[in-house]
Image (spheres, coloured by chain):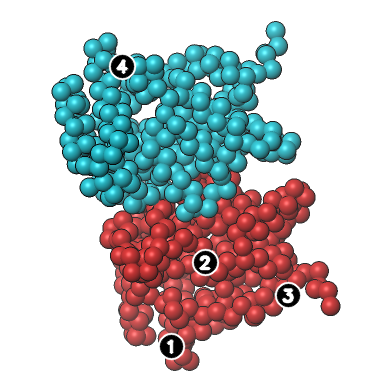
Chain colours: A cyan, B red
Amino acid sequence: MAAAAHEPEVIRDKAVMRAWSRCRRAEGKAVALVPTMGFLHDGHLSLVSAAVAAAAGPVAVVVSIYVNPSQFAPTEDLATYPSDFAGDLRKLAATGAVAAVFCPPDLYVRGRAGHPAAGASGGAVSCLEDAGGHAHETWIRVEQLEKGLCGSSRPVFFRGVATVVSKLFNIVEPDIAVFGKKDYQQWRVICRMVRDLDFAIEIVGTEIVREADGLAMSSRNVHLSCEEREKALSISRSLMNARTAVLNGNNHGQQLKDEIVQTLKEAGGQVDYVEFQSLTFSLD
Amino acid sequence: MAAAAHEPEVIRDKAVMRAWSRCRRAEGKAVALVPTMGFLHDGHLSLVSAAVAAAAGPVAVVVSIYVNPSQFAPTEDLATYPSDFAGDLRKLAATGAVAAVFCPPDLYVRGRAGHPAAGASGGAVSCLEDAGGHAHETWIRVEQLEKGLCGSSRPVFFRGVATVVSKLFNIVEPDIAVFGKKDYQQWRVICRMVRDLDFAIEIVGTEIVREADGLAMSSRNVHLSCEEREKALSISRSLMNARTAVLNGNNHGQQLKDEIVQTLKEAGGQVDYVEFQSLTFSLD
């Protein structure tokens, strides 16, 4: 039986991916890339819709699925990151809008096992180097925007994201790439990298997609127990409360932050940081 | 009077450059990039020949001329780097092989004057940040190969080279790029970056071009007085002597290095380093 017309083509090889992309361009289509780590939810599917909407004319949408080891620290959850490739393919096919799925087995040149891993700039090491041996040694850093916020507790994260996204850009050669603003610092890092390195790519940012009860959709939510999931609502609830307060004229930034921290802690949360983007300066 | 057919097109704008390059590709030509900092000599012209030779079919050769501030430390010679744009254009036209010259006025987003420059990774600062204000903040580092050799005395050099070459790659989108092996560590850094970041570009390396008396051609040679130029021959002479000794079976690596250092010092030279690439391990 022939595959349905909207069944995405599955591509595993870098060179095949690039050739496929160049063919689409030669046909007069824009190529739009949606980079993901798989285990797709409606947030990801909104990225696909945004890719279609962003193109002025015919577009070929490529969704990449790759769990990037270099953005995980060895203490983080690379080993338990959820995956469901068959389910992902079904969801993407159902959109009718995805032309290809790029799912490379690996994207890095690996070194010899047992070869000592060199520390990244700043001494941090990711799961890539930690896997024993390193050969990949080129890293892209967005030196100001990677600092602070999530960068404080995740020292290799933005280096790994900027580097793998740059690799995906060079392999897929898209005209458009779509990222969710849920990962807001990441979105800013990508935009800055594209500007600074002159990538010929339009970066589209999409708004957070939430569950009916307010929880931001995330692949990692699958790890939450019922009780933890309930407690996690303290995040959206406290942020919404702060938003309402600001809209009602409350301009006590520090007080609002303190209230968020208190709500999170009462729910049993360990708080990495609470920060208002750009409002920090006008509210305090 | 119409320009001769071999007169290169002069392009100053990034977007025009990229569009030009895509037109050549659409015509079925390969695009070959020869990045330079201008003040061209026969070494540069050999890069142009290598670009033509490397292409399997029709090729459009682009020579970029841009003195990149981010690879100079504030203590180095950015301000006095020689230039002769009219002369460069004449030489390139005379080859009959150059389709376009890309000479952007600037390649970096600049910050506000007086804004304090943030130190690069490792605390080093280049002429880009030193110019007062910084906005560009994305840097590519090839973390192993940039260490040692020239990297020891020029802490921002390879970071600046990798970053600007990556920008040129994203603007010109070449199929081929040509670099001289005179700057051997730079050549290795570029090759590694292209491999690690999946640039779809074939990197071609060319051998050193020397003056009749053995001096390696370099734009900076114009700064040498007659006396200094004579002394500079100690570099090629001592290297050639060591090469002859190795070919004759001398395997005393340290002794050979010491002899080179001695020759250089006798000529009044200050020695940054003397090293044998790869032979270091087998000879000592």
Which image quadrant is residue B101 in? Answer: bottom right
Q: Which mark is residue B94?
A: 3
Asked if the residues shown at circle 3 and circle 4 are in contact, with their CB atoms under 8 angstroms apart, the answer is no
Vertical comparison of B71 with A226: above or below: below
Q: Quadrant of the C terminus of chain B?
A: bottom left
Q: Are marks 1 and 4 on the same chain?
A: no
Q: CA distance from mark 2 to mark 1?
A: 33 Å
Query: What residue is pinned by disc 2?
Result: B106
Q: Are marks 3 and 2 on the same chain?
A: yes
- Residue at left 74%, top 36%? A27
- Residue at left 51%, top 25%? A46
Q: Position of residue A271 (x, y in %)?
A: 20, 31
Chain of the residue where label 3 is placed in the rendered structure: B
Q: CA distance from mark 2 to mark 4?
A: 49 Å
Three-letter amino acid code at disc 2?
Answer: Asp
Query: What residue is pinned by disc 4?
Result: A223
